[in-house]
Image (tube, rainbow, N blue to C red):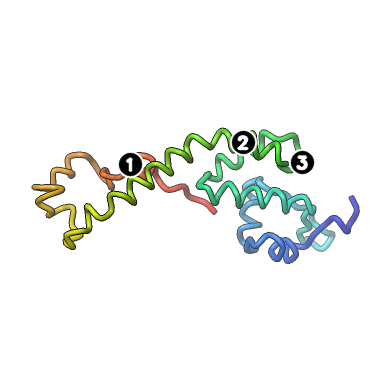
Amino acid sequence: MDTKDLLTIGDVVHRSGFPHSALRYYEREGLISATRTSGGQRRYRRSELRRLAFIRAARSIGIGLEEVRTALQSLPDERTPNKADWTRLSKAWRARLDEQVEALVALRDGLDGCIGCGCLSMTTCRLVNPDDQAAAMGEGAQGLPAALRRPPVHGR
């Protein structure tokens, strides 16, 4: 491999916008890879920038790291995602995104019903939740659409 195709961690931070800690984390998680110089310094192939762009795009639409990992593992070894890969993979995520959009629109359109009176309390609201009937529905914000009640995805 030509050394001009290798980037330092600083170069990758600058080009990708990810902090050093995220690059090290993604490397530990097997999402990207680096080689080491004889002095132990990381060197990344230029193509890792595309993998990082893929990770950023997927994360920005709410795709968790496990799904990102699975998507990247579906590619031939060492290959970076291309436009055709993104098209194929994003089709699988489209239905979930559509569901989330619908849920967010419903949430947006229903916001004034909850806070219009100014009480800001679902526990004591006599109109929306008399006698705290919502408590029987379970923990968390049960009034939110299911797509917005998914547990948070941990990781970067």
Q: Amino acid at mark 3?
A: Glu
- Report which residue position mark 2 lands on: 89
Residue at 65 percent across and 46 percent down: it is: 31
Give how far apart the Cα atoms at labels 2 and 1 are: 25 Å
Task: Give the left or right position of residue 124, taking residue 9 as reference.
Answer: left
Give how far apart the Cα atoms at labels 1 and 3 are: 40 Å
- Report which residue position mark 3 lands on: 78
Residue at 79 percent across and 60 percent down: it is: 7
| Tag 2 near tag 1, CB within 8 Å | no
Of badges 1 and 3, nearer the viewer stands: 1
Q: Amino acid at mark 1?
A: Pro
Residue 105: percent from left, percent from top = 37, 47
Name the element at disc 2.
helix
> Could you say which disc has been placed on residue 64 in the image?
none
Give how far apart the Cα atoms at labels 3 and 2 are: 17 Å
Residue at 73 percent across and 62 percent down: it is: 9
- Seen from the viewer's position, the closer of residues 118 and 13 is 118
Name the element at disc 1.
loop
Of badges 3 and 2, nearer the viewer stands: 2
Q: Amino acid at mark 2?
A: Leu
Residue 82: percent from left, percent from top = 73, 41
- Which comes before the other along the chain, label 2 or label 1? 2
